[in-house]
Image (cartoon, grey):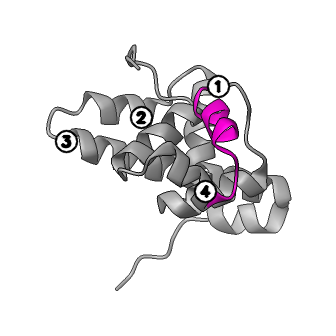
Amino acid sequence: MVNDGRPPTLGELIRQQRELAAVPMRKFAEMVGISNPYLSQIERNLRAPSEQVLEAIAEHLHVSADVLTAQARRVDGGSVPEVVAAIRRDPDLTKAQRSALEEMYGTFREVTIAKRRRGGAASRADSAPAEPDD
């Protein structure tokens, strides 16, 4: 599938990671514990995986489910955060480095957003300035 410059969807990301791991679709579906047609529909963005299935997929891809969902939310959200745009523009980074930085940034943001949703004290503590290390 040709990428038109947009970040991959959740299904595309799963397919890319599975292919990078060199695991055939049928074998991967078996490993995750789902049917081959269901995995195919997920990879083609025809069906969204349940949280349980997403966790199993992420585990077998050796990535965090948070990273996968953060990538998908960035696609759904439309606009690219300025930090991600800066990472993509940096000529001194390799493609792999850009990808890793984008994933880390997305994960950090998702964790912070989740803490804010859970409530006040945790997010206030996280937003306090860090004490310098001596």
Mark 3 neighbour class, 10 Å CA radius: few under 14, some 14 to 19, many 20 or more: few
Q: Position of residue 73 (x, y in %)?
A: 64, 34
Mark 4, residue position: 30
Magenta: main secondary structure equals helix
Tell us which disc is closer to us: 4 or 2.
4
- Three-letter code, disc 2: Val
Mark 3, residue position: 93
* Extreme residue toward the bottom, this view: 134
Helix, strand or loop at label 4? It is: helix
Residue at figure coordinates x 59%, y 49% from the top left: 109
Between the C-alphas of marks 1 and 4, the distance is 32 Å
Q: Is residue 119 above or below residue 102?
A: below
Mark 1 neighbour class, 10 Å CA radius: few under 14, some 14 to 19, many 20 or more: few
Quadrant in which the N terminus is drawn: top left
Q: Is residue 110 visible?
A: yes
Mark 2, residue position: 84
Residue 47 sits in which quadrant? top right
Residue at figure coordinates x 45%, y 53% from the top left: 104
- Three-letter code, disc 4: Glu
Sequence-first disc among 3 and 4? 4
Say which of 100 and 48 sits in front: 48
Residue 12 in magenta stretch: no
Helix, strand or loop at label 1? It is: helix
Sequence-first disc among 2 and 1? 1
- Three-letter code, disc 1: Gly
Between the C-alphas of marks 3 and 4, the distance is 37 Å
Say which of 7 and 122 sits in front: 7
